[in-house]
Amino acid sequence: MALLLPFTSTTWASAVPDVQRVLANHCVLALPTETFYGLGVRPTDESALQRLHRVKGRPSDKAILLLIGRRDQLSGLVASIPPAAAVLMDRFWPGPLTLIFPAAPELSLLLTAGTGTIGVRLPPIPHLQELLHVVGPLTGTSANRSSEPPLDAADDVQRALGADVDLILDGGRTPGGSASTLVDTRGTPRLLRPGALPTEPVRAALAAAGYALSS
């Protein structure tokens, strides 16, 4: 079964060596986010990405989002930052808003699913930000088998995936509810998925900058 480690504002640093060990061995970890638990591997690790797809049973045509701890970590992940993305980043990051960017050309097809785009989120959990700042961006796809409900407790992740993931960072029960709001920022901004961040503030922020949000 997966190793379970406490992950709080006072314990996160002690988990770093185990996280680095798991990542160095091309393995998968589970971590709490502001919505549900997610599954993390390095976006540059093709072997770990393949394992992640096997763990989830994820179809190859489904893209995988990334989590960052600082905005400067977008470098190497995105080909450009559309103006609408800059507006939303300034207003709502850190927060439960996943933005779709043009993907950097070197990103794996296992992340982009051939779409040429990548979804990125800066989560509003300070100690998760710190971890990501230390170890680098990680995938943040929900910690569940494809077609099954997302999970909001480490014990549930252990029961469902403990034989297939190597480390679970136990941050207690996450808020659950809705997944992150998803907006494609290329060209005319488009709402792809309503979620934890209400749509109207997003629409208003874009409108104030001269953009209309389509759906």
Image (cartoon, rainbow, N blue to C red):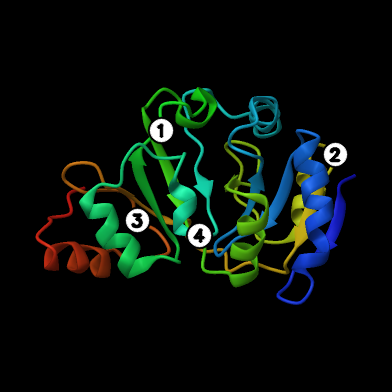
On screen, residue 14 versus residue 171, left or right, reads: right
Residue 159 image point, x, y percent: 81, 49
Q: Which residue is mark 4?
A: 70
Q: Quadrant of residue 209?
A: bottom left
Q: Which residue is mark 3?
A: 194
The circle on residue 104 is 1
The amino acid pointed to by label 1 is Ala
Q: Assign the N terminus to one quadrant of the image.
A: top right
Residue 191 image point, x, y percent: 27, 50
Distance between the Cα atoms at labels 3 and 2? 33 Å
Distance between the Cα atoms at labels 1 and 4? 17 Å
Distance between the Cα atoms at labels 1 and 3? 26 Å
Q: Which residue is mark 2?
A: 163
Q: Are marks 4 and 2 in contact (CB under 8 Å)?
A: no
Q: Residue furthest bottom?
A: 10
Q: Nearer the viewer, residue 33 or 89?
A: 89
Name the residue located 13 percent from the left edge and 68 percent from the top edge.
Answer: 208
Q: Earlier in the sequence, mark 4 or mark 2?
A: 4
Tag 3 secondary structure? loop
On screen, residue 182 versus residue 52, left or right, reads: left
The amino acid pointed to by label 4 is Arg
Distance between the Cα atoms at labels 1 and 2? 33 Å
Distance between the Cα atoms at labels 3 and 4? 24 Å
For marks 1 and 2, give the one nearer the viewer. Answer: 1
Residue 106 image point, x, y percent: 47, 26
The amino acid pointed to by label 3 is Pro
Q: Earlier in the sequence, mark 3 or mark 2?
A: 2
For marks 4 and 2, give the one nearer the viewer. Answer: 4
Number of numbered discs overlaid on the protein picture:
4
Residue 201 image point, x, y percent: 26, 70
